[in-house]
Image: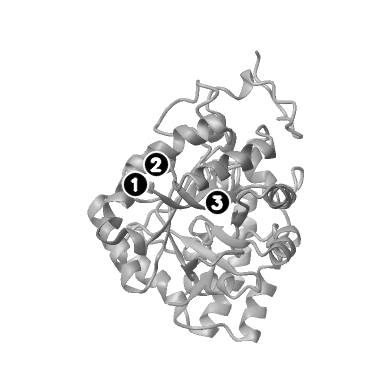
Amino acid sequence: MRYKLLGNSGLRVSDLCLGCTTFGLNWGPIGTGKDESRRIFDTFAKRGGNFLDTSNKYQEGQSEEFVGELIQTDRDYWVVGTKFSLVDGGKDGADPNASGNHRKNLLRSIEGSLRRLRTDYIDLLWLHMWDYTTPIEETMRSLDDVVRSGKVRYVGASNFPAWWIVKANAYARTHALTPFVATQVEYALTERSLEPEFLPMCHEEDVAICAWSPLGGGICTGKYNRATPNPAIYRRLDEHVDPARKAFWHAATVRNLRIMEQVNEVAAKIGRPTVQVALRWLTQQLVPTIPIFAAHTAAQCEENMGAVDFSLSPEEWKAVEAATRPAVASVWPEVGPYPYPMLEFGSPALPGFYSRGLLYGKSEYVIENHRRPFRLLHRPEA
């Protein structure tokens, strides 16, 4: 395992980050029990991993609880990232102030995260999603306050536009506040629409990229291109693969399957599992990019960790790039490139996770939000 500096900071994080979305059972088949979560955690640790990613939303808080228990034997070794913004704890979101990026929700959320994580500080606090509402000035001042309090070490922005991060960091620097050192974005072989904006921005601003769903919800493992799927392996995209079900992300999923047919061929020539090629391609970006991978079993974790055991030659890297070039286009052209499809509805990598519902619950249509540039095509009756 090698380590990267996290953006414009001195913090050293492993080449791969363990996503703890699956730690817990509150989300049914998406989750993993405590014993297997510990085996996944131990596998990651033995390979030199030190970077963990969770959220107050994941498994409705259970993920943070599992992580909190697992890090107790050596808390200071672990770089623990968690998030706030979304409706958490299984609540319905009726309270308009129980979500979003404003000061009130930040302070409420962070106290809950510290309690569940059984720690007195968070290494990296992420805003989970742009809420279109909270002014940059309020966000940056509030984040700086929790850093100065010692409860947070660094801050990052997840699912925010590139221009917003530049504007926020410019404000932070001119007012001696804490800037963002990293951005968490959807980035995978099947989702590259962020590249024209985010790669130049992150290079120029020295902001690290942490790629969520670097395996495209599983499609970048190549398993959905296999004729006879393993019934023991959970497949969250099956509904969107089958044209008879007429699922929302079917067309995007068909496009991604065509991309992965070519990537599988490249991986076969390299002599590595497709999943390792998918992760390795991201780690070799010019802009420091750290894939955040999740696993349901320790065996999956071990296979994914094999991505750090080799390097793609320039020719191999270019072959993967050429095969995945269609993914530079947006999966939802009417809305635009990432992050706008994700902010408006979700992602083909996370079908069923309606972003606006996660962010607002039942409160979206009772908030008169004059700052939101997009409007839904259909608004329910008031």
> CA separation, marks 3 and 1?
17 Å
Q: Amino acid at mark 2?
A: Ser
In the displayed structure, 69 sits above or below 26; it is: below
Q: Would you say 345 lies left or right of 279 here?
A: right
Q: Can you see residue 27?
A: no
Q: Amino acid at mark 3?
A: Val
Q: Which residue is mark 1?
A: 117
On the image, the x and y values in percent for residue 229 come to: 41, 61
Q: Earlier in the sequence, mark 3 or mark 1?
A: 1
On the image, the x and y values in percent for residue 365 come to: 63, 21
> CA separation, marks 2 and 3?
15 Å
Within-10-Å neighbours for mark 1: few <14, some 14–19, many 20+: many
Q: Which residue is mark 2?
A: 113
Q: Would you say 129 lies left or right of 43 here?
A: right
Residue in the foreground of this view, choosing between 262 and 186? 186
Circle on res. 155: 3
Within-10-Å neighbours for mark 3: few <14, some 14–19, many 20+: many
